[in-house]
Image (tube, grey):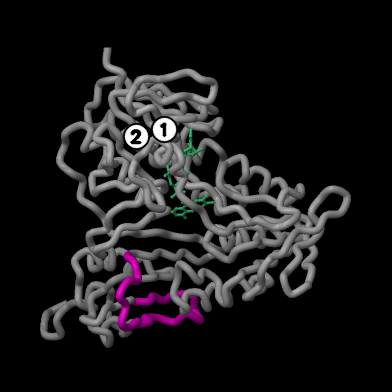
Amino acid sequence: MSAGVIIVGAGHAGGAMAAALRQNGYADPITVIGAEPVAPYQRPPLSKAWLKGEAQQADLLLRPDSFYAEKSIGLRTSTHVAAIDRAARTVRLADGEALPYDHLVIATGSRLRKLDVPGIATPGVLELRTLADAERIRSAIRQGVRMAIVGGGYVGLEVAASARSLGAEVVVIEREQRLLARVASPELSAFFERRHREQGVSIELGASVSGFEARDGQVSAVRLADGRSLPCEVAVVGIGAQAQDELAVQAGLSCRDGIVVDELCRTSDPLIHAIGDCTQRPLPRYGASMRLESVPNALEQARQAAADLCGKPAVKSDVPWFWSDQYDVRLQIVGLPRDVASKVVRGDPSVGKFCVFHLDAEGCLQALEAVNSPGEFAAARQWVGARQIIDATRAADTGLTPKQIIAAPDQPT
Ligand SMILES: Cc1cc2nc3c(=O)[nH]c(=O)nc-3n(C[C@H](O)[C@H](O)[C@H](O)COP(=O)(O)OP(=O)(O)OC[C@H]3O[C@@H](n4cnc5c(N)ncnc54)[C@H](O)[C@@H]3O)c2cc1C
């Protein structure tokens, strides 16, 4: 009997991959192995609706628990894969059991960067990657609790917004001189800084954390490198993530800040695909390869790898996109701001509805950041992929609809 496919990692990519294999008619056994105690679920709500108590655990699941049995997908939760033996075509579980595969898919995601400072293990110093992490944070949030958030990236700011809306007193501590410094334009950083301050969040920029202080065995303050101590009863550290690619490295697969894959998600071993946050993937639109940490990427790679395994035509590749929800703000970003020669702001940041167009030297749209502007975002998804040349004056003209931005002046619109 065929050993079938083993998927290591029961997250967004691994769960979607199992479903896509069955959709593509794959009839041999499928086993999904995940270290967490739950079936594949969505992480984005963990810092948003779920943290605010607006979603239940069942709402997070990618598919109901019954789906896996119905589709004859073996789901092994709370199970850690310790090693891959490529010669024997097996994976070894933490308890020593060896499971054979015909084909392996690595979907191990990313892990949080650790802040290496004294007191990091103090009770009350939390982080957010899993549902269990989110449960700890949710149970710590209450009216008036003082919460320090270390890291002004998307996850940190989303937690700040959710906690603030539940009445917590929040301070965000960011080492760089602006929020979202690695992932957003200065225009966007300034907008989110203002929005958080308006909501009563304190923000410390250019501030480095040197340790955590404790009282009665519980965190009591965050210590900064400039000598100040910021009192808190709970701290959440969110300073980014890195590829969880150790299994692949140990198995001798080609890795470089993630598992190196091609456009079909094939690794350097023809019997192994890799998908999701753990991959270093090509982005032909930008002539580059990089690691993407996003749900759209996980879903696209799952569909791509499933099609490849089933001998189906390649799935059309999308340009990278991402979203973040904070207060009443929906941010949507499409593309990557590479080789940017100029930027155009459309709309008015002070009323919370605007876009930033990132153009290269030829005026080609490389990326768009859209704040509460779904029409512009939808249009830009097409334009970035099509390398659309954008006229800066028309882009800035809010009297034109998004579609009219690219219509020639003498064309009926
Ligand atoms: C709080 C939060 C908010 C987010 N918000 C957004 C958002 O708004 N928009 C967006 O696009 N993206 C968002 N993301 C990112 C998005 O969730 C990830 O890009 C996505 O989950 C990647 O899917 P994945 O399957 O590659 O990895 P994961 O979902 O991380 O799944 C990997 C799984 O593999 C398991 N695993 C790892 N190693 C082993 C092993 N050796 N044995 C067994 N199991 C193993 C892990 O336990 C994990 O369950 C957010 C992430 C977080 C944490």
Instruction: Give the residue type at disc 1.
Output: Val
**Which contiguous range is marked in magenta?**
335-357
Element under disc 2:
strand
Which residue appears farthest toward the bottom when viewing the image? 393
From this viewpoint, is residue 86 visible? yes
Does the magenta segment cover residue 43?
Answer: no
In the picture, the quarter occupied by the C terminus is bottom left
Q: Are marks 1 and 2 in contact (CB under 8 Å)?
A: yes
Does the magenta segment cover residue 343?
Answer: yes
From this viewpoint, is residue 144 visible? no
State the image coordinates of residue 186 (x, y, percent, origin top left): 47, 78
State the image coordinates of residue 47 (x, y, percent, origin top left): 56, 53
Q: Which residue is mark 1?
A: 8
The label shown at residue 105 is 2
Q: With respect to residue 367, does 68 lie above or below? A: above
In the picture, the quarter occupied by the N terminus is top left
Decide: few, some or many residues near mark 2? Use Cα within 10 Å; few <14, some 14-19, many ≥20.
many
The residue at label 1 has a CB less than 8 Å from ligand 1 = yes
Q: How many marks?
A: 2
Question: 408 left or right of 159?
Answer: left
State the image coordinates of residue 194 (x, y, percent, origin top left): 58, 77
- Residue at left 64%, top 43%? 135
The one nearer the camera, 188 or 108, is: 108
